[in-house]
């Protein structure tokens, strides 16, 4: 389908990432104002003509989750009422993803609820990175392009030329991701057996695989309170591991996360800019940010041109600009 033009609009959640996407595409961010009425309600106005345009709204639903989610929904509604040709929500980090099933009685499935809200507001398509659970793609009744930060992180760790390396998953659910890293880096694979004792706390039982005398790369989709991360690192160190590196996509980093990372026997942590770091995280010498702006920008370009997006799942050596 033909659209008049490609437009990029952002809320307040992650303007730096939106600017990076804009720079990659060599298209300026559309003029839009997102502020507050005196009583705290969101006031949003798009100051450019979007009629018939292919519009991409860049807005992760990161903390403050409710504020950023409402900005996204109001932005979608604004564009729909302004007769945008197609509205694609670019949600680098998808909040409310933890509740993706009823694992006990009388609880919501908020991942599905938020998917319904986004579609009902008027979104035609979703572009996201590293969903907390793969099945969330099926919660949407509109097309979802699900990217992975794996190729971007992989390029960085290849440049380090780490020797005697083992890739570790901090829990059984992350084995598939860890296996992809281990295969790409020609490294061994290990798993930390994690048992959750409460919504905020986990208990590490034992390590499956050999880590003694080896450098470790621990991979996960997000870091929230860093409790699992710190406990797993301590366990791995106790098993004789050498330097411990961590690669995670989403730096939620709430509560005591930074203090735990500082105290843990971790050499460095790489995260992406799907979520902007807070001031405390930026001051942490162990944390390094790798941008996914080019990855998202290339996906946006391909969606706009009706080209394949699935090839972006491959390693970045095929895409030198990523």
Image (cartoon, rainbow, N blue to C red):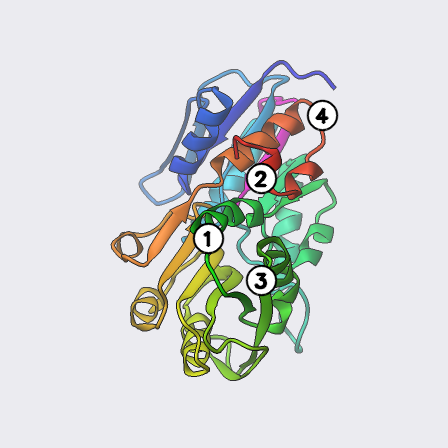
Q: Is mark 2 on a helix, strand or loop?
A: helix
Question: Percent position (x, y) of residue 97?
Answer: 58, 59
Question: How far separated are the C-alphas under marks 3 and 2?
Answer: 19 Å
The image quadrant that residue 300 belongs to is: top right
Residue at figure coordinates x 59%, y 44% from the top left: 128
- Is 130 in the magenta? no
Give the mark, 3 or 4, whose residue is nearer the N terminus. 3
Q: In this view, does 116 lie above or below 203?
A: above
Q: Residue 249's mark?
A: none
Q: Is mark 3 on a helix, strand or loop?
A: loop
- Residue that carries the numbered disc 3 in the rendered image: 187
Residue, disc 2: 316
Q: Where is residue 193 in the image (x, y as percent from the top left)?
A: 57, 79
Identify the residue position indicated by label 1 in the image: 161
Tell me: 92 left or right of 52: left
Foreground of the two, 73 or 216: 216
How far, Cα to Cα, is label 3 from label 1? 11 Å
> Upstream in the sequence, badge 3 or badge 1?
1
Disc 4: which residue: 306
Crowding at dot 1, Cα within 10 Å, few <14 / some 14-19 / many 20+, comes out as: few
Numbered disc total: 4
Mark 4 and mark 1 lie on one chain; the one further toward the N terminus is: 1
Magenta residues?
82-92
Q: Identify the mark nearer the N-term, 2 or 1.
A: 1
């Amino acid at each position: 389908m033909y659209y008049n033009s490609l437009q990029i609009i952002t809320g307040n959640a992650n303007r730096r990432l939106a600017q990076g996407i804009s720079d990659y595409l060599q298209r300026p961010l559309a003029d839009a104002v997102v502020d507050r009425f005196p009583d705290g309600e969101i006031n949003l106005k798009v100051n450019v003509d979007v009629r018939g345009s292919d519009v991409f709204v860049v807005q992760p639903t990161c903390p403050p989750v409710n504020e950023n989610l409402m900005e996204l929904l109001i932005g979608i509604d604004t564009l729909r009422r302004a007769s945008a040709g197609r509205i694609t929500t670019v949600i680098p980090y998808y909040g409310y993803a933890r509740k993706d099933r009823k694992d006990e009685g009388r609880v919501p499935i908020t991942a599905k609820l938020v998917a319904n809200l986004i579609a009902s507001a008027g979104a035609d398509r979703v572009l996201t990175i590293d969903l907390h659970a793969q099945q969330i793609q099926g919660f949407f009744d509109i097309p979802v392009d699900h990217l992975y930060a794996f190729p971007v992180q992989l390029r960085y760790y290849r440049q380090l030329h780490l020797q005697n390396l083992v890739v570790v998953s901090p829990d059984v659910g992350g084995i598939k991701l860890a296996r992809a890293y281990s295969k790409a880096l020609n490294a061994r694979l290990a798993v930390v057996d994690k048992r959750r004792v409460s919504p905020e706390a986990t208990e590490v039982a034992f390590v499956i695989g050999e880590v003694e005398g080896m450098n470790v790369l621990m991979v996960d989709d997000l870091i929230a309170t860093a409790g699992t991360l710190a406990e797993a690192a301590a366990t791995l160190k106790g098993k004789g591991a050498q330097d411990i590196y961590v690669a995670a996509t989403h730096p939620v980093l709430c509560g005591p996360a930074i203090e735990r990372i500082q105290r843990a026997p971790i050499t460095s942590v790489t995260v992406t800019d799907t979520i902007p770091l807070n001031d405390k995280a930026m001051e942490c010498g162990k944390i390094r940010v790798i941008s996914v702006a080019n990855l998202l920008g290339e996906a946006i370009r391909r969606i706009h041109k009706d080209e394949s997006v699935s090839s972006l799942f491959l390693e970045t050596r095929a895409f030198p600009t990523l």
